[in-house]
Amino acid sequence: MRSQDEIVAARNADWRELETLVSRAEALHHLDGPSISRAAALYRALSGDLVLCRARCTPDLVAYLDNLAGRAHSALYGAEPFRLPAFGSLLTRDFPRALRKNASFFALSTALFLIPCAIGIVLALFVPDAASQILPRSMLDGMADMYSKGFDEGRGEGADSAMAGFYVRNNVGIAFRCFATGIFFGLGSVFYLIYNGLNIGMVTGWVTAAGFGRNIGTFMCGHGPFELTAIVVAGAAGLRMGHSLVVTQGRTRLGSLRESAPDIVHLVVGAAVMLLLAAGIEGFWSPSAAPPPVKWAVATLFSLLVTAYFLFAGRERARTP
């Protein structure tokens, strides 16, 4: 039977190594994968040491090991505190930074949305039978009829308010599905991006084939820069979430998800703000009686603003010597 001195001599190096790892970061999730795996192995060994030491060692040593085990457990499995940043800072800094940091997910999300959208347009323009087999013919004809009259006379103020509310609910629903279904290892986001891109493209192509392409284009151009970008951003957040569940880099799935949570939250909140802007424009400006050239000029300005925002907002200023 080993004495306390023999136990300490045999195990002290591992205890010190675990203490060093725990002291390096309040949350071990910030360390690299091998360090986290090593800390987990040391923590499991320490748990066995505690059982032995409680039977053979002094209270002081047991208290030290209890404290070390508690710190290691909190670092490995405790929840990392997350504070919702100030709303202004989120919009002016955190959201565009998060998008640039996750540019690869944004690019993939954009491709998953725009390529099916282009395919949908081509199908509806040149293979109308195929389009009507994918979407109900009654819905396609209804959309063509809705845009047949154009918006030269605008739309009633009461109708504008009601439609703005509808657009908020509809747009948020689309973006939410593109994001939330990313929990299924990203596959849900992939499906809904392709599904929505194909549907939007098919409706656009069908209305254009019916001879009302100018009307639907003029209607969509104003809110499109905000709405379509927001849907793609929400899809990027879903893909980021799915990626964190698949590529854990030695962490638990929950720990990996927790590590990516700040970026995901910034993307989702930013997308939600863009959707609200889009709904307001879609409800009041897009169906207005403003001349089409004015609407296209405003749409160009909106597109430039969105692009400049994501490229430059939140960047650190160069330090002068």
Image (cartoon, rainbow, N blue to C red):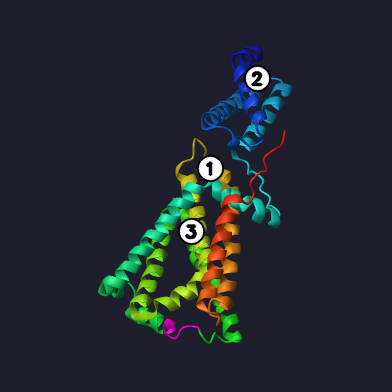
Name the disc covering residue 256, or none. Answer: 1
Residue 207 point in image, percent of width and height: 37, 77
Task: Select label 3 or label 1 by which is in front.
Answer: 3
Look at the numbered disc 3 and give the secondary structure of its residue.
helix
Q: Would residue 43 be counted in the magenta stretch? A: no
Q: Residue at x 43, y 51 (%)?
A: 108
The residue located at (55%, 51%) in the rendering is 99
In the rendered structure, the answer to whether residue 11 lies left or right of residue 61 reads left
Q: Amino acid at mark 1?
A: Ser
Could you say which disc has been placed on residue 56 in the image? 2
> Residues under labels 3 and 2: Cα distance?
61 Å
Name the kind of residue labelled 3 in the image: Val
Residue 91's spot in the image, x, y percent?
65, 56
Seen in the picture, residue 251 relative to 34 is either above or below; the reply is: below
Give residue 132's position: percent from left, percent from top.
30, 75
Task: Check residue 297 in the rendering and tell me which mark sits there, or answer none.
Answer: none
The magenta span reads 146-151
